[in-house]
Amino acid sequence: MAPCEIRYGLLVRPAWELRAIPVGTWLVLPCRAEPVLYVAAGNGRKDTIVVVRRDGHWRLLWRGAELDGGHLGVAARHIAAGTAV
């Protein structure tokens, strides 16, 4: 799988889980850049979530935190709890 496809897959599952909570999400697929997930924050703004490869592992970056890309359900619950604040 190409990096864009991996990043897309790593953003779709948390987006789907956040939607079920419900937390609003927007998955953006730019034509010449990597995919980005936006999450509705409690204060009306949109937080950005991006996926990076660091030290051989995929990580979700959100509000300065690095969340494990191998545990997307846990990451989604962490993000959901943070958006309520």
Image (cartoon, helix red, strand yellow):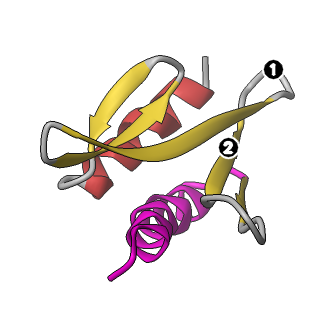
Q: Tag 2, which secondary structure? A: strand
Q: Residue 32 placed where, x, y %?
A: 74, 65
Front residue (pair 39, 33): 33
Q: CA distance from mark 2 to mark 1?
A: 11 Å
Q: Which mark is residue 70?
A: none
Q: Quadrant of residue 60?
A: top left
Local packing at callout 2 (Cα closer than 10 Å; few below 14, some 14-19, many 20+) is many
- Bounds of the magenta span? 1-24
* Residue under the image location 65 percent in, 37 percent down: 48
Q: Residue 3 placed where, x, y %?
A: 40, 67
* Residue under the image location 69 percent in, 46 percent down: 38
Front residue (pair 80, 4): 4
Q: Are marks 2 and 1 in contact (CB under 8 Å)?
A: no
The vertical placement of 33 against 56, above or below, is below
Q: Residue 82 vs residue 19: left or right?
A: left
Q: Which mark is residue 43?
A: 1
Front residue (pair 28, 24): 28
Please state, as top left, top right, bottom left or bottom right, where the C terminus lies in the image: top right
Q: Residue 67 placed where, x, y %?
A: 30, 35
Residue type of the residue flagged with mark 2: Val
| Magenta span includes 44 | no
Q: Quadrant of residue 59?
A: top left
Residue type of the residue flagged with mark 1: Asn
* Residue under the image location 68 percent in, 59 percent down: 33
Q: Which residue is mark 2?
A: 39
| Magenta span includes 20 | yes
Task: Count how many numbered circles sit on residues in the image.
Answer: 2
Q: Residue 40 placed where, x, y %?
A: 74, 40
The vertical placement of 42 against 1, above or below, is above
Q: Tag 1, which secondary structure? A: loop
Please identify the residue farthest to the left as the structure is shown: 56
* Residue under the image location 14 percent in, 37 percent down: 55
